[in-house]
Amino acid sequence: MVEPPKVDEPRVEDKLFYNRYLVDAGRPHVKIRAHVEPSPELLALIKICPARCYELNAKGQVEVAPDGCMECGTCRVIAEPTGDIEWGYPRGGYGVLFKFG
């Protein structure tokens, strides 16, 4: 049985609030391959991305909003080998700016 978090322990979402992200407008570092129906790997990204950058649109396709991406590499492990996404590091000075370790 999973124990509920203690009252004095901050949630992950609260900790992520301290991070900042500098958007490189017009140059996303994650791109999704065009698709009519999403692959199982793309659908998995909706649930496993810790920053919740992936979502299903009204047409049933997976979209990415890389603003706020923590660059953890989870999507690279899951979907880059299948060719479903293209992932590259943001240009210097852009991307996630971690605070407090």
Image (tube, helix red, strand yellow):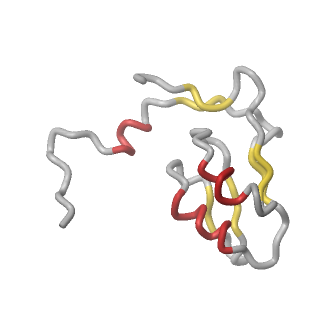
Q: Residue at point 81% right, 77% down?
A: 36
Identify the image quadrant of the C terminus: top left
Vertical relation: 92 (above or below) 33: above
**Foreground residue among 12 and 65:** 12
Say which quarter of the image contains residue 58. Answer: bottom right
Q: Residue at point 57% right, 64% down?
A: 46
How many numbered circles does the render carry?
0
Left or right of residue 14: residue 76: right
Left or right of residue 77: residue 11: left
Left or right of residue 1: residue 82: right
User: In the image, residue 35 lies at what x, y percent?
Assistant: 82, 71
Identify the image quadrant of the N terminus: bottom left
Q: Residue at point 59% right, 50% down?
A: 74
Say which quarter of the image contains residue 25. Answer: top right
Left or right of residue 100: residue 30: right
User: In the image, residue 49 lies at what x, y percent?
Assistant: 55, 54
Say which quarter of the image contains residue 60. Answer: bottom right
User: In the image, residue 4 lies at what x, y percent?
Assistant: 18, 57
User: In the image, residue 43 lies at what x, y percent?
Assistant: 62, 70
